[in-house]
């Protein structure tokens, strides 16, 4: 038969809570005992048992409530600690977000600044290159002019070659046309270059042919190497081809004459 154990204050918070089934069984037992009681002594004994069970249940409930209160307070403390930790985490998260946003803005500003600096540096380099090329053009124009006056064909051709290698459009630039001409050389660089190339090409062809006639191989080589420098490689090749063809033709005529002489002797 199910029954309640007598309350023991020394058991503390470990006293078990009776189940509904155990309570119903205990009530049924007490009811049966009351029905079977035949005298006052038995009734008083049952009354004492009921008081004892009452006290026991009160203790158990009190222990349960105390235990639940402790657990509740512990849970509340844990929740409070979690709330504080979560609040701190959120604050850190906001701080990190702000730092990230600030870093992103700073990065964008730095990127834009670097882009502007690169653009400025590129413009400065372009301007520097332009000024250097103008200086080279002016120097080489005067060197070519002096070389042509002194019939220094190699130096003149080298200066013209340097001028031709300068960036396209530089020689016809408005600033160049303003800065390069001088009182001694007042023609525009573009006009001078075309004039010099034609003049030198005519001279080189003439001198090459004279060297070919006199079989002066040193002068032939000298003038042949000048044609590419002034951009007239094709004319140089034509002159050289005619020179070789002339040699072959001469040798062929010589061979034919020798053959004819031999035939006449026979």
Image (tube, helix red, strand yellow):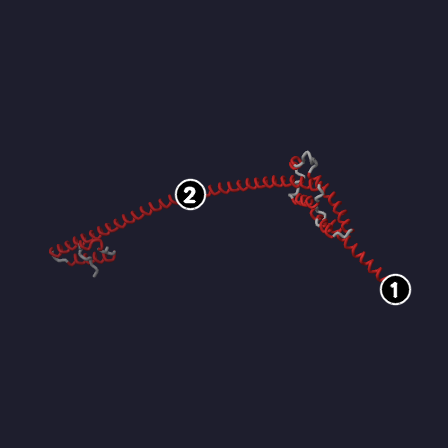
- Residue 18, compared with residue 160, is above or below; it is below
Identify which residue, 142 or 80, lies in the foreground. 142
Residue extending furthest bottom?
A: 266
Question: Which is more N-terminal, label 2 or label 1?
Answer: 2
Q: Quadrant of the N terminus?
A: bottom left
Residue 94 position in % (x across, y down): 40, 43
- Rounded to the nearest angstrom, the CA distance separating label 1 from label 2 is 112 Å
Which residue carries the number 2 mark? 99
Identify which residue, 159 or 81, lies in the foreground. 159
Instruction: Estimate how packed mark 2 is, as few (under 14), some (14 to 19) or many (20 or more) residues with alpha carbons within 10 Å.
Output: few
Residue at 35%, 45% in the rendered image: 88
Residue at 80%, 58% in the rendered image: 251
Quarter holding residue 179 = top right
Foreground label between 1 and 2: 1
Instruction: Estimate how packed mark 1 is, as few (under 14), some (14 to 19) or many (20 or more) residues with alpha carbons within 10 Å.
Output: few
Residue 142 position in % (x across, y down): 67, 39
Residue 29 position in % (x across, y down): 19, 58
Identify which residue, 135 or 115, lies in the foreground. 135
Per the image, label 1 sits on a secondary structure element best described as: helix
Disc number placed over residue 265 in the picture, else none = 1
Residue at 38%, 44% in the rendered image: 92
32 left or right of 233 in image? left
- Residue 172, compared with residue 77, is above or below; it is above
Disc number placed over residue 80 in the picture, else none = none
Per the image, label 2 sits on a secondary structure element best described as: helix
Cβ atoms at labels 1 and 2 below 8 Å apart: no
Quarter holding residue 146 = top right
Residue 121 position in % (x across, y down): 55, 41
95 left or right of 156 in image? left
Q: Quadrant of the C terminus?
A: bottom right
């Amino acid at each position: 038969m199910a029954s309640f154990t007598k309350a023991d204050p020394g058991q503390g918070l470990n006293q078990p809570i009776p189940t509904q089934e155990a309570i119903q069984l205990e009530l049924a037992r007490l009811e049966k005992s009351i029905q079977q009681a035949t005298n006052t002594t038995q009734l008083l004994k049952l009354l004492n048992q009921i008081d004892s069970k009452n006290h026991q249940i009160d203790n158990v409930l009190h222990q349960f409530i105390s235990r639940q209160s402790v657990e509740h307070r512990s849970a509340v403390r844990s929740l409070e600690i979690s709330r504080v930790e979560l609040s701190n985490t959120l604050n850190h998260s906001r701080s990190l977000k702000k730092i990230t946003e600030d870093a992103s803005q700073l990065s964008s500003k730095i990127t834009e600044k670097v882009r502007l600096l690169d653009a400025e540096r590129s413009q400065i380099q372009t301007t520097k290159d332009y000024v250097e090329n103008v200086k080279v053009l002016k120097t080489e124009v005067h060197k070519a002019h002096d070389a042509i006056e002194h019939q220094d064909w190699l130096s003149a051709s080298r200066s013209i070659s340097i001028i031709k290698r300068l960036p396209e459009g530089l020689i016809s630039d408005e600033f160049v046309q303003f800065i390069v001409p001088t009182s001694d050389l007042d023609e525009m660089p573009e006009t001078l270059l075309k004039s010099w190339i034609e003049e030198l090409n005519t001279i080189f062809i003439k001198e090459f042919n004279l060297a070919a006639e006199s079989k002066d191989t040193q002068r032939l080589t000298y003038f042949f190497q000048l044609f590419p420098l002034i951009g007239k490689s094709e004319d140089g090749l034509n002159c050289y081809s005619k020179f070789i063809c002339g040699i072959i033709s001469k040798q062929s005529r010589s061979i034919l004459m020798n053959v004819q002489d031999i035939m006449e002797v026979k």
